[in-house]
Image: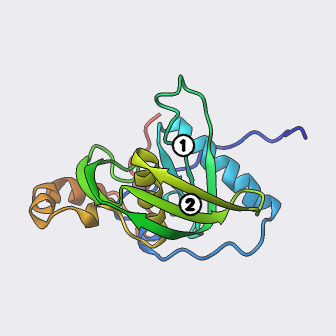
Amino acid sequence: MMKSRKPNSLHIRLYGDKTLREVAKPVTEFTEEINNFIDNLVFTMYQKDGVGLAAPQVGRSLRIFVVDPLWFNDEGNKNPLVLVNPEFIEFHGEIEKDEGCLSLPNIFEPVKRAQMVIIEGLNEKGKKVRYEAEGLFARALQHEFDHLDGIMFIDKVTKLKRVFLKKKLHDLQGTTDENGRNIGEITL
Ligand code: NI
């Protein structure tokens, strides 16, 4: 089927935004609006050079995220995976690696994650999907899933590291408006 609609770029919410700290709600219906939103989420992830993007990061408190951990090293071939209402089934091992987040620009810190995971959820069509993931894929799934529970990777770094990041975080938070919305300073 042909798609006539062009996806839109969505504003990334930054640290300090209240939606980033909410527990997102499950999706109950795959409406056209939700489908369009998912297209926009995928489009925005690539546009911002992200490995993943979760709905709360663009101000929608819904249990949806998209990931594509391979496109950086797969000659730019895009293979976005959509997960709606995901649940982890298994975690195995532990590994510490640097992480970043589009909602925490210019911050990269080591975070401990499971080395291998199994996740289930629904895809963009509402069909049940299951992935066994390792390495960066497993890390991206855990990072994005956390966003659905209002958790950011910065919550998982050591207290000492957070002391050093205090000013950066304070500055990021500073562009939050009176409604708890933080899209930072818009630069074109
Ligand atoms: Ni993130």
Crowding at mark 1 (Cα within 10 Å: few <14, some 14-19, many 20+)? many
* Rendered residue at 60%/28% (across/down): 77
Q: Position of residue 38 (x, y in %)?
A: 67, 53
Instruction: Look at label 1 and name its amino acid.
Output: Asp
Taking the image as shown, residue 21 lies to the left or right of residue 66, namely left
* Rendered residue at 35%/64% (across/down): 16
Q: Secondary structure at mark 2?
A: helix
Q: Nearer the viewer, residue 172 or 71?
A: 71
Residue with the most extreme top position? 75
Taking the image as shown, residue 147 lies to the left or right of residue 109, namely right
Taking the image as shown, residue 92 lies to the left or right of residue 83, namely left
Earlier along the polypeptide chain: callout 1 or callout 2? 2
Instruction: State whether label 1 is within 8 Å of ligand 1.
Output: no
Residue 68, label in figure = 1
* Residue that mark 2 sits on: 55
Q: Is residue 171 visible?
A: no
Crowding at mark 2 (Cα within 10 Å: few <14, some 14-19, many 20+)? many
Residue with the most extreme right position? 1
Taking the image as shown, residue 116 lies to the left or right of residue 113, namely right
* Rendered residue at 35%/63% (across/down): 152
Q: Nearer the viewer, residue 164 or 64?
A: 64
Residue with the most extreme front position? 92
Residue 140, label in figure = none
Ligand 1 image position (quadrant): bottom left
Mark 1 or 2: the one toward you: 1
Q: Pointers 1 and 2 in contact (CB under 8 A)?
A: no
Q: Position of residue 147 (x, y in %)?
A: 45, 64
Q: Quadrant of the N terminus?
A: top right
Instruction: Look at label 2 and name its amino acid.
Output: Ala
Q: Secondary structure at mark 1?
A: loop
Q: Position of residue 10 (x, y in %)?
A: 58, 49
